[in-house]
Amino acid sequence: MPQDTLSITDNRTGKAYELKIENGCIRAMDLRQIKTGPEDFGLMAYDPAFLNTANCRSAITYIDGDKGILEYRGYPIEQLAEQSSHLEVSYLLMNGELPTKTQLDDFVNKITLHTYVHENIKGFMDGFRYDAHPMSMLASTVAALSSFYPEAKNVKSKDVRRVQMNRLIAKMPTLAAFSHRHSQGLPYVYPNNELSYTENFLTMVKSIGTTNWRPHKALVKALDILFILHADHEQNCSTTATRVVGSSEVDPYSAVAAGITALYGPLHGGANEAVLRMLREIGDKKNVAEFIKRVKAGDGTKLMGFGHRVYKNYDPRAKVIKKACDEVFAVTGKNPLLDIAVELERIALQDDYFVQRKLYPNVDFYSGLIYEAMGFPAEFFTLLFAIPRTVGWVTQWEEMITDNEQKISRPRQIFTGQRGRNYVAIDKR
């Protein structure tokens, strides 16, 4: 008998089945042959939230949560964060290999050509209320881009796809900066294509009353590192949303807009804001021990920024961010919440309660401290997630489009409602 198989005996019928195991998986459709009779639809797997279901084959991002490993196209995130740039990592994700100097220069030039948005987009954004959340503005304007580029619907053409992917990567910082400026009542600042990707973004966000203002190089570098860390993260909620919507062969702007709206949720992109609220609630380093006691007592107090659906070890991204904190605070001054965060991490990592549950700091634990120190309001944090994740979304989208096994997404359900009811006239109900 082959070793890479799973033998199943259906105790309802006594029949035996042998299912092939490949890459640690069985094919869900192979379960359909297991039936009690000709009228039986066949066996299905019930998996709420897809916690144990692989919906695709992917060669982009590898995660080993038990060992705390994150790799883009085989390269450790720690090496990329230390030595690379966000646009170089973007090229790597999209093309599978690190670029040569010539290839990178060409790629950067292509991105730079698309940083501007149509003037009508400004009028579209002006239609939002002064207090509109920047994420709702971003999702809406990205979806609106599909009306400016009708050729984007030709998703089977690689050349057409790549132009749209470049446009999305290039325009996302511009749209995000415009969203922020709108919410602050400030005039929009146009892209400066003589600046790097991250420096240009910070300039569009922060510049007031001058064309010569430039952000500190240490802040540019720190944000570029954060962009690298957030570029992709396998089949998370927003990536899955992008893939599912994209499976209908809609244009990539609409698919990415779905990813943005998924990221908008507090369980996905808003976790670092929750960490800041928690640290402010603790208030002082001396209160950390008492806070930990409340968490362990189960009185509803939550330890935000610890634990992850995937990682059962220290999130490798959190280690990189923790190192970046010092460089940022050397410029901005130390965030007063940092001492509380460090003490909270120290106590939690020594406490068996958290160690046994494999609750380690994740990427959100320190990122909010950096964003706040750089002067970003809390409602803007999720946009700082969406900008770099755009390359992950479009790369995952293209991988899905070119995968011959993929079809339009259509999960099954277990029906639990009533059947066979007759309509009753309204005067007899």
Image (spheres, grey):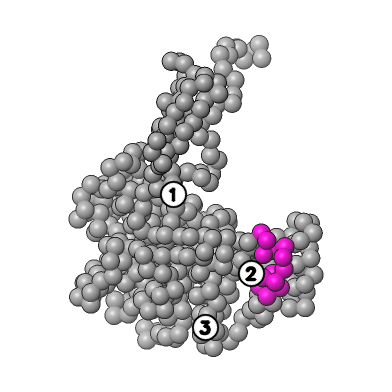
Q: Nearer the viewer, residue 15 or 46?
A: 15
Q: Residue at x 42, y 59 (%)?
A: 62
Q: Nearer the viewer, residue 359 or 145?
A: 359
CA distance separating discs 2 and 3: 17 Å
Q: Which image quadrant: the N terminus? A: top left
Relative to 365, is 78 on the left or the right? left
User: Which residues make up the magenta segment?
Assistant: 345-357
Look at label 2 and name its amino acid: Leu
Look at label 3 and name its amino acid: Val
Residue 187 location, quadrant: bottom left
CA distance separating discs 2 and 1: 27 Å
Of the numbered discs 2 and 3, the one sitting upstream in the chain is 2
Camera-side mark, 2 or 1? 1
Q: Is residue 268 above or below residue 273?
A: above
Q: Nearer the viewer, residue 352 or 191?
A: 352
Q: What residue is shown with label 2?
A: 276
Of the numbered discs 1 and 3, the one sitting upstream in the chain is 1
Single out the residue that lies furthest toward the bottom.
330
Q: How would you rate the neighbour count of disc 2 (Cα within 10 Å): few for under 14, some for 14-19, many for 20 or more? A: many
Q: Is residue 216 above or below residue 390?
A: below
Q: Position of residue 252 (x, y in %)?
A: 33, 51
Of the numbered discs 2 and 1, the one sitting upstream in the chain is 1
Q: Which mark is residue 328?
A: 3
Q: For residue 210: magenta?
A: no
Q: Position of residue 270 (x, y in %)?
A: 56, 61
CA distance separating discs 1 and 3: 33 Å
Secondary structure at numbered mark 1 = helix
Secondary structure character of the magenta stretch overall: helix
Q: How would you rate the neighbour count of disc 3 (Cα within 10 Å): few for under 14, some for 14-19, many for 20 or more? A: many
Q: Residue at x 28, y 42 (%)?
A: 404
